[in-house]
Image (cartoon, rainbow, N blue to C red):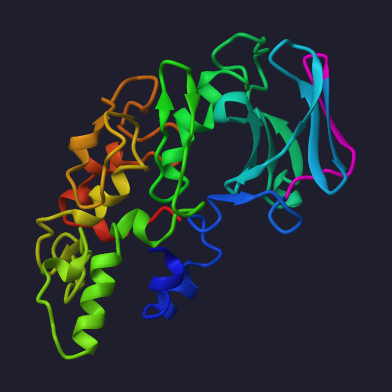
């Protein structure tokens, strides 16, 4: 269905979404979306000088490739926007590889507006799984499912190729609310005076946990108290699919299903979490939030990441 249909009735929400991190999660590389310096800029790391430049309207990086030698690679997509932006390079077999040199998009006064290497203290050689042309920086396998809507990897193990597809390139309405065609059908039926009475308004999941809820401060403890307990945690489960450390079990997840049906969350291991349970990196905060006092007081509505 797509966002264009959703915004016919939800124009305010559409305006609020525009320019968000979800909106800018992945974009075609062009003059408006690319933040990095491609004006013949260079970065030297472990004796390798990578150069970023424009050629015939394309964004190109001259850097070491699968054989460890320097080659020109076209940038097809931008990935993320702040505090850094990464870049995707197309490879044979339907692969997109994430360049291991990223653009620091934070303000120059904060040390940003520069190219930097994702592994500044360790030389990653060609053939290593952490090398940018290898599996751990493969977009299809590692990143794609959380940056686009209704993404299907379509991996063929016999040929080791991908035919990855998406409905929308970014994280749009149906990525969280689920397929919207039945919802639109119900809305049209209501407008025509023939309410279908569809459960959940025709959506696979309805986020309404905050309706008529308010917070007060307990006079004795001076802690916030929710007016009614949050028993469903649907919003948190909706965020967990992408904002958790987990492995994926199935490519067929539909919003509204149990998180555990398609994903296996990581345990609170030393390499992922600090001793007090806080996450060590990025935005995979679901695991640590689940054990927080705020969560157990029903504070799921504060689980905002972009």
Q: Which residue is drawn at 18% across and 71% down?
A: 201
The residue closer to the viewer here, 152 or 279, is 152
Q: Is residue 291 visible?
A: no
Q: Quadrant of residue 283?
A: top left
Q: In this view, does 37 lie to the left or right of 111?
A: right
Q: In which quarter of the image is residue 298?
A: bottom left
- Residue 100 lies, with reference to residue 235, above or below; the image says above
- Residue 194 lies, with reference to residue 173, above or below; the image says below
Q: What percent of the width, then of the height, locates residue 62?
A: 82, 28
The residue closer to the viewer here, 42 or 287, is 42
Q: What percent of the width, then of the height, locates residue 297?
A: 16, 55
Q: Is residue 195 magenta?
A: no
Q: Residue at x 26, y 51 (%)?
A: 255
Q: Which residue is drawn at 41% across and 72% down?
A: 5
The residue lying furthest to the right in this view is 40
Q: Give the position of the N terminus as an image quadrant.
A: bottom left
Q: Is residue 83 left or right of residue 232?
A: right
Q: Which residue is drawn at 28% across and 57% down?
A: 178
Total count of labels: 0
Q: What percent of the width, then of the height, locates residue 86?
A: 63, 39
The residue lying furthest to the front in this view is 158
Q: Does the magenta stretch include residue 39?
A: yes
The residue closer to the viewer here, 98 or 140, is 140
The residue lying furthest to the bottom in this view is 193
Q: What percent of the width, then of the height, locates residue 240?
A: 29, 44
Q: Which range is magenta?
A: 35-48
Q: Can residue 13 be seen in this view?
A: yes
């Amino acid at each position: 269905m797509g966002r264009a249909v959703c915004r016919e009735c939800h124009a305010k929400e559409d305006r609020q979404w525009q320019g968000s991190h979800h909106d800018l999660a992945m974009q075609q590389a062009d003059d408006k979306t690319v933040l990095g310096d491609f004006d013949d800029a260079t970065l030297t790391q472990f004796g390798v000088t990578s150069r970023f430049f424009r050629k015939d309207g394309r964004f190109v990086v001259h850097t070491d490739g699968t054989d460890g030698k320097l080659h020109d690679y076209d940038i097809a997509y931008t990935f993320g926007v702040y505090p850094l932006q990464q870049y995707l390079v197309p490879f044979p077999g339907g692969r997109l590889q994430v360049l291991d040199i990223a653009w620091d998009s934070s303000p120059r006064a904060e040390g940003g507006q520069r190219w930097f290497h994702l592994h500044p203290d360790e030389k990653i050689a060609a053939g290593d799984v952490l090398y940018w042309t290898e599996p751990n920086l493969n977009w299809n396998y590692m990143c794609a499912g959380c940056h686009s809507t209704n993404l299907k990897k379509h991996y063929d193990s016999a040929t080791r190729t991908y035919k990855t597809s998406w409905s929308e390139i970014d994280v749009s309405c149906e990525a969280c609310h689920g397929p919207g065609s039945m919802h639109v059908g119900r809305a049209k039926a209501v407008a025509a005076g023939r309410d279908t009475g569809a459960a959940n308004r025709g959506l696979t999941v309805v986020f309404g946990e905050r309706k008529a809820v308010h917070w007060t401060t307990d006079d004795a403890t001076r802690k916030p108290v929710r007016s009614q307990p949050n028993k469903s945690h649907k919003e948190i489960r909706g965020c967990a699919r992408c904002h958790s450390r987990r492995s994926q079990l199935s490519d067929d997840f539909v919003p509204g299903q149990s998180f555990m049906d398609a994903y296996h969350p990581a345990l609170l291991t030393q390499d992922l979490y600090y001793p007090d349970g806080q996450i060590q990196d990025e935005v995979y905060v679901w695991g640590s939030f689940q054990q927080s006092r705020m969560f157990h007081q029903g504070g799921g509505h504060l689980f905002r990441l972009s």
